[in-house]
Amino acid sequence: MVLLPLRQITLPEPSAKAVDTWLGELGEQLDDLGCNRYELCRRTLYDLYYPGAGSYHDRLEDPDTPAATRAALLALDPRHVTLEPEYYCEVDESRYAKVKPLLWLWQSFDRSPLGGGNVAAGVALRRLLAGHIFKRCGKNFKCFQFVEFSFGYNLEVGDNVVVHRHVLLDDRGGIVLGDRVSIADYANIYSHTHSITDQVDVTNATTVLEEGARITYHATVLAGVRVGAESMVGAVGVATRDVRPYHVNLGIPAKSVRVKPNAPTAGEVTLDSAARRSKPDA
Ligand SMILES: CC(C)(COP(=O)(O)OP(=O)(O)OC[C@H]1O[C@@H](n2cnc3c(N)ncnc32)[C@H](O)[C@@H]1OP(=O)(O)O)[C@@H](O)C(=O)NCCC(=O)NCCS
């Protein structure tokens, strides 16, 4: 076995200071109960996308501003865009209205020159925003770029959770991530499903990933599944049924192929999982 822990890297002093100052100011504004999040999002995105371009309102009101530029300027304010979850019938409009500007800021930052793969700034911004979007967000949340949510407000996150790039966290029916959960690149966690005969017949079901569960590359967890503590869904697997604690489930549908060697005694694992699971894998 080769242990390859992550290296410690810090930004050069000028950029570290600029990012710290910016996020400090952003955090103070978000903590202010009177904060207009839509204006804050618009101002922040203007600073990110049009640095040094003068007044936003002057550019918007200038009759010579091309229509495409006007549309792009307006879209910096999330009141002028629609996001897919707004179309869902069961959206809680007032809760979504509170998180929408922060979700739009998150997504737009990821596509900006400052964002994308910029780990140091990106992880810090997302950690800040997550605390104001999720139902609960524990310590040290680490999230890489291009992660997507449904409502955001139906997501509960424990301590030391890591979410890698291009993950989909569909929290439409609720997602609970226990402490130390890790979700690898391009994985999908769903919490809603459609009837096979009627597309608008939707079932929402909370999906739970217990503490220490690992969902690996390109794997999918379907709505309502409980992935047990310290278990793993292998690359490209589809968890259609509960995964027992400490089990490694592979394939489509994901089935248990082994129990991790660090599992407690078989008796304890079986007892523990039997108490929690409703529809275990085969
Ligand atoms: C689950 C996993 C760890 C299995 O590793 P392993 O226990 O060492 O298994 P092996 O590589 O010895 O393979 C055992 C068998 O399972 C098969 N297998 C391995 N991974 C599989 C997968 N994801 N899906 C289906 N079958 C798989 C192998 O082909 C082999 O089959 P065989 O016995 O018929 O030859 C690994 O394949 C995996 O999915 N890793 C994901 C990488 C990861 O950790 N990502 C997260 C980083 S943040």
Image: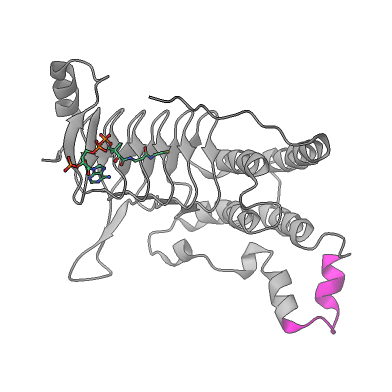
- Residue at 69% across / 76% down in the picture? 71
Q: Which of 204 and 212 is in front in this view?
A: 212
Choose top left, top right, bottom left or bottom right for residue 105.
Answer: bottom right
Determine which quarter of the picture holds residue 46.
Answer: bottom right
Q: In this view, does 127 lie above or below 86?
A: above
Q: Where is residue 27 in the image (x, y as percent from the top left)?
A: 70, 39
Residue drawn at 86 percent across, 65 percent down:
53
Q: Please tell me in which quarter of the rendered image ligand 1 is found.
A: top left
Front residue (pair 62, 249):
249
- Residue sitting nearer the eye, 99 or 161: 161
* Quarter of the image where the C terminus is located: top left
The residue lying at 81 percent from left, 34 percent from top is 13
Q: What stretch is highlighted in magenta?
A: 55-67
- Residue 130 appearing in the image: yes
Q: In which quarter of the image is the N terminus?
A: top left
- Kindly tell me whether residue 277 is visible in this rendering: no
With 122 as the anchor, is 237 left or right in this view?
A: left
Q: Which of 238 and 80 is in front in this view?
A: 238
Q: In this view, does 145 lie above or below 10?
A: below
> In which quadrant of the rendered view does residue 51 lie?
bottom right
In magenta segment, residue 62: yes
Left or right: 41, with 198 as reference point: right
Residue farthest along the front direction in this orientation: 2
